[in-house]
Amino acid sequence: MSAAPGSFQLGRFTAACAADGRALVPGEPIVATLCDAPEGDQSGHEFVRRDFSVTAWNAGSRPTGLVCFWRTTAPEPDQKRRLLVDDDTLLELFDRLEGDERPQRIAYRWLMCLILLRKRLLRHVRVDRQETAEWWLVQKRGMDETIAPIRVLNPRLRDEDLQELSEHLGEVMQSEL
């Protein structure tokens, strides 16, 4: 899986509500979303960020292709970045990517699996090797061990691909806060 430089970049805080275009005021509670890039998008990005006022979100406004969302506040100009995505949101995104067979989505899910294993939110059960594929079987911490493990395909990423995905995921998990 090779991608052009920058192809995993994610837009940052948009400063406007995606539902009504209203400017989002620094310090205002907002809902940040991660969505599939629109069909025909020429940027080559897999995901885009859309920000919503809490009022618009509570009124039912939702973006097309919603993958996950998190609540935060609109940043002050020139504020340092901080981690936005909590463990539950990471697990939700990991779950939502299950069954998506697009190569970049498989790679994201693999990377998220590694992160969740490192954070001890997933537990490694075993590896199943087939002729052309390697599946890691994992379970969520605290899950009943009689429940079948979660299968995660190892896309066998090159180091540079893994680095690029890690940088992009860092963009997803941080904001200008």
Image: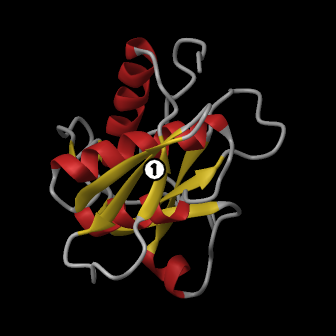
Residue found at x 36% / y 47%: 112
- The relative height of residue 145 versus residue 79 in the rendered view (above or below) is below
Q: Seen in the image, is 167 located left or right of residue 143?
A: right
Q: Seen in the image, is 103 located left or right of residue 115?
A: right
Q: Seen in the image, is 140 located left or right of residue 109?
A: left
Q: How many marks?
A: 1
Residue found at x 51% / y 36%: 107
Between 39 and 72, which is closer to the camera in this rendering? Answer: 39
* Quarter where residue 25 is shown: bottom left
Q: Position of residue 70 (x, y in %)?
A: 37, 66
Q: Position of residue 39 (x, y in %)?
A: 81, 44
Q: Position of residue 175 (x, y in %)?
A: 31, 44
The extreme right residue here reads 40
From the image, which quarter does the N terminus lie in?
A: top right
Between 8 and 14, which is closer to the camera in this rendering? Answer: 8
* Quarter where residue 166 is shown: top left
- The relative height of residue 51 versus residue 6 in the rendered view (above or below) is below
Can residue 76 be seen from the camera position used here? no
- The relative height of residue 102 versus residue 116 in the rendered view (above or below) is above
The extreme bottom residue here reads 59
Going by the numbered disc 1, the residue's amino acid type is Ala
